[in-house]
Amino acid sequence: MADMTATSPGAAPQGLQTADGRPLKAALAASQARAKRRAFYLVAPLLAFVLLTFVLPIGQLLSRSVSDPRFIENVDRSSGEVTPIMVELRDWFKANPPGTEPDEAAYQALAQGLAQLAELRGQGDVGTRINYEAPGTRSLFTKTARRADDLEAPFKEAILDVDEDWADPVLWQAMRDASSRYTINFYLAALDMTRDVDGNIVNVPEDRQVYLLLFKRTAILSVLITVTTLVLGFPVAYLLATLPLRYSNLLMILVLLPFWTSLLVRTTSWMVLLQSQGVVNDLLVWAGIIGDDGRIQMIYNQMGTVIAMTHILLPFTVLPLYSVMRPIKPSYVRAARSLGATSWTAFRRVYLPQTVPGIGAGALLVFILAVGYYITPALVGGSSGQLISNLIAFHMQNSLNWSLAAALASLLLAGVLVLYWLYDRLVGIDNLKLG
Amino acid sequence: MALPIHASRLERIWHYTYLTICALIFLFLIAPILIIIPLSFNAEPYFTFTEKMLSFDPTGYSMRWYDTLLTLGMTNPEAPRNAAWWADAWANSTWIRAAKNSVIIGFFSTILATALGTLAALGLSRPEMPFRRTVMAVLISPMIVPIIITATGLFFFYSKTGLAGSYVGIIMAHATLGIPFVIITVTATLVGFDQSLNRAAANLGANPATSFFKITMPLILPGVVSGALFAFVTSFDEVVVVLFVAAHDQQTIPRQMWAGIREQISPAILAVATILVVVSIGLLTAVELLRRRSERMRGLSPG
Amino acid sequence: MKRTLILTSALVAAGVAAQAEELAVMSWGGAYSKSQVEAYHKPFTEKTGVTVVDVVADNPATPIKAQVEAGNVTVDVADVEYADAMALCDEGLLEEIDPSILAAGADGTAAMDDFLPGAVTDCFVATIVFSTMYAYDDTVFTGEKPTTIADFFDLEKFPGKRGLRKTPKVNLEMALMADGVAPDEVYDMLETDEGLDRAFAKLDTIKDSVVWWEAGAQPPQLLADGEVAMTTAYNGRIFAAAVSEGKPFVSVFNGQVYEYDGYVIPLGAPNKDLAMEFLAFATQTQQLADQAKWISYGPARKSSGPLVGLFEDGKTEMGPYMPTAEQNLEVALPSNFEFWADRNVELSERFNAWLAN
């Protein structure tokens, strides 16, 4: 930078030059580029690390949400060898448009595929894959593959003889869908939709709809939690911001201690407090507010989720509010009062507008964190207090429909990223504060 | 906050109501954390105060749940408590094993997160950093993206790369989760950092490494240390990633608590919780002292 | 950094070294795991010097499946329900077990004749017969006591919260039995849409009063904490709480659903040979009989039956607490593994939708 000012007074006609005779513009650009590179080199290791351990895995997750090739290829679990399967049937699907009545050729192709599966012991995988699209069909594959060697022409009759459910057009549509490597069906399923026999997108029957409801519930509970944290956080932040520093620093510990305490510890405490033989109910019974048989169910339902999550997320509202309120000068409110405003008007018209950035920052952050909560609802939510994250975990760990889990996760991720982008635009990531 | 002398009666009433409301909210914040401490000394296997506890009868209190933290999982818990007993506890006790895992994973992931994070924060706080906003957004995102999504992604990624069920895998994952905290705290410290100090050092003949260690480092150290503490707590408290990618021999304290809470929330869980509360009080104190020191050094605080 | 790397790799190496002499067995936790530790793990360690690590899961079948599918198996042996074992075996997720490794009965009967019918399959060796029944807290119901499965669903006669396992399995069967369907017609009825609707309708009548449990250790805890007035549970857990901890719990076997449970070896288990050795060891006549000393589950070998005597307290006769005791089989249903192997996925989906709505 120093050579910038050291331009020689006898500048050449083509413009300013540095001491060693290079044009100043080029030297400046080179020096800036060097500074840029240097700054970037400092960030590069971490960026590479985060790309590897975070961005790449999530990218992989997204790719899984549009693909489950278990109807196309069989992977041998011990050797890792990949064998294409159902080749003939997939060719038949290619040759015939959707809705074609499966003919003898189709059944022959199916029989060939099943015989190959029986050899590879792959019928379970294929059955599971098709079962996602056409529930209740898994057993057809295991049952028929077991007898694949005995199947003889005419194949249609032979297969229908094993189980007449093979004639179900829903099943054929499902196999057709599964023959393409990429599919949006998992996203459809994640939105409570499916395809009918002609391949049109329709809603699933009402008694099977669950995901939209869960997304909606996640949003509603998150809004509720956000509003509650604001209602509770605002007075506290105001008190902390208006007290002299030596008091407010002390009281701040009461906000920061929960922030530093393990999430599981806080969730456990709420279980201890809220269960029907717990401290709160005992207190209410002792005080005579409720009878011993009228104990309130405050946990293992939505109430449990809301109370525990409000407590856990409250510091995330208080801290940004506090940092916005602290620098607000009391003289503005005093001026308003002296001009004749009531204390309520002064607060509403003068003080409150100045805290809006803090309210926005806190609310957005709490909402973003709330929609992705998993641990707390899993422990205190019962069945009505579960959020979408819990369903993702269910499909990851119990039903093992990983592509559906990935599709649900992708939808949740998209929502969170939009909010994150909004947060960056409105608040700025740089302004994120931690105590 | 003091009430002005000319306040009306209504304002007085409101003022005291307001203070009461605030007190109740503080109670809401802090009571759940403090309530478990006495309950962890319950002599009975319940989560509520027994009559004996309320009347401060010493027989209502006991250390038995702390004792089970040692004995659970031991091969021979009934043996006399000599050196062999303690060796048994150290090697086999479920909770001690979990604590060892937590400390090992926390330690290495903190070092990784702090080293990479501090370096990156130095780059990020230079005005000439290209794509600053985007890069920052990417680096902070592990804090924002729901943990279940991160864990799911890691589950697939680690299964393919053979990192599943390994310490390295969990350490890397926890480092990733801790990095945003390091970046936030260190960049916050660097906001008040006077770049001309480094130029002065260079002017006096120091090379970049010397000026970093002699000038920059001591000034941003409080930020780095509190970032490291945040990263450690993040790892120490993390359960979802461990649930998804750890093998049975990498169980951490939160993972063990998760299992315990779902199975049987005996007061032994409260004993662990109490220990963790004490740990977090310690960490909070450390961070507060650091923050004040940093503010004093940079002249930002009245005291 | 370098030191970190060295330390980390040393750590990992230590982890690997430790694994070589360990066998990881995944089971259901609580009193049940304890009975296995006492009857199988400890004697096996004594005999071979191999440490057996007890790994706990809500239902070991699901983590096993996830591990094999992801190609990342860390468990050597798993304890799973019969229907789950069938489904896993069908999908090629388990190692096949050569029945010739199983020991003959103590009385000399060949292994395959000694085990109860169907208890040994291609990839599964049963250890116990367990039952899901319901239990209530005796102090809650001072007047008339619940005695039938219909009473469990009767909120008017017996008010209070109910505990149910958060799966469709067993709940649907119990709902139909409570609705008056004879046990031998239950699965035929569940095959039809009307039957399923009827089962869910019956569950609807108590849905608002249900606390759902997932791990086997939860129901006795829920009863003890007074969170529920009655709950379904694995019979051995209630027995353990009632007899060894003296809790006032009463078991009702009317409407019970019983099933085999036993060991499988996941495909690609890290110590496969050792796992086979453990499996053969644990399923010997004496070991199976020993387990019944710790928990009230019936042994899967005929030759173990006569060896079952008293509970470990030395005074409680185990017979009446077994799911297979004659008086407990009056209204009882053997779980249909084929039904659940085929329909679990589909019915879980419907069950989840029902739960959420």
Image (cartoon, grey):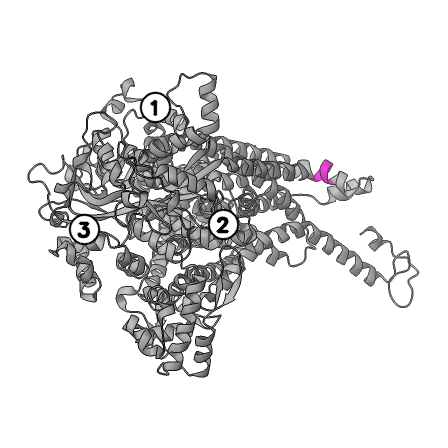
Looking at the figure, which quarter contains the N terminus of chain B?
Answer: top left
Residue B9 falls left or right of residue C92: left
Q: Mark 3 vs mark 1: same chain? A: no
**Which secondary structure is most common in the magenta stretch?**
helix
**Residue B201, position in %: x, y?**
78, 40
Point out which mark residue B64 bears. 1
Q: Position of residue C93 (x, y in %)?
A: 42, 54
Disc number at residue B93? none
- Residue B110, by quadrant, is top right
Residue beneath disc 3: C333
Asked whether, in this view, residue C200 is left or right of residue C278, the answer is: left
CA gap, disc 2 and disc 1 = 39 Å
Front one among B288 and A242? B288
Query: In the image, are marks 2 and 1 on the same chain?
Result: no
Alpha carbons under labels 2 and 3: distance apart = 37 Å
Residue interval drawn in magenta: B212-216
**In this rendering, do the residues under marks 2 and 3 share a single chain?**
yes
Q: The C terminus of chain B appears in which quarter of the rendering?
A: top right
